[in-house]
Image (cartoon, rainbow, N blue to C red):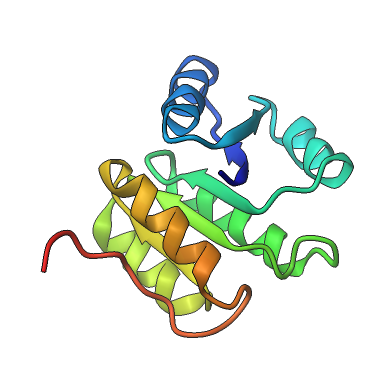
Amino acid sequence: MARVQLIHWKEAEGRARADELRGLGHSVQYEADGSAAFALLRREPVDVVVIDGTLRFAHGRGAVLALRQGAGTRSLPLVVLGGDVRELSALRTEIAGVVVAPWDQAREAIEHALASPSGGGTPSTPRAGP
């Protein structure tokens, strides 16, 4: 079980996604307000940050960049779930160490992010099946 910070800008959807992650056995902290989410992350460190990628690409990219630039969050494993595959592929290429996957591969993506060296290495997407 990992300690997960979920970043999602739509409160109802965010709470539902947090429940999904809890259903996978994770301890999840979630705040709908972006500033409050980052403040919570500074107060209560986590093992991995999950960012919902179905929102505007600029929001997700901005969150990833802010986390990579912050001294206390630079080395955290980052997972972006859902969203436009083309845009997220560009993000994975631009920012090393970000794991990108659809929401239905959340378990595998989080496991992959936790097993990989954080903040570096080769970005990758978990694949379903052999």
List the single residue furthest toward the right: 43
Residue 64: x and y in percent read 60, 59
In which quadrant of the rendered view does residue 74 lie? Answer: bottom right
Give the position of the N terminus as an image quadrant: top right
What residue is drawn where x is 51% and y is 23%?
Answer: 10
Query: 15 above or below 24?
Result: above
* Rendering quarter of residue 122: bottom left
Specify the farthest residue to the left: 130
Rendered residue at 69%/67% (across/down): 68
| 92 left or right of 76 in image | left
Considering every residue shown, the one lying at the far top of the view is 12
Considering only vertical position in the picture, is 19 above or below 28? Answer: above
Which is more toward the observer, 78 or 56?
A: 78
x and y percentages locating residue 118 in the rendered image: 62, 73
Q: Position of residue 13 (x, y in %)?
A: 44, 21
Furthest-bottom residue in this view: 121
Is the C terminus in the top left, top right, bottom left or bottom right quadrant?
Answer: bottom left
How many numbered badges does the structure rendering display?
A: 0
Depth order, front residue of 43/58: 43
Q: Nearer the viewer, residue 111 or 10?
A: 111
* Residue 34: % across, % down: 69, 35
Using the image, determine if residue 15 lies above or below residue 86.
above
Report the residue at 71% width, 48% height from top. Answer: 46
Task: Identify the residue at horizontal 64%, vertical 63% (top origin).
Answer: 65
- In the foreground, 65 or 7: 7
Residue 75 lies in quadrant: bottom right
51 horizontally vs 42: left or right:
left
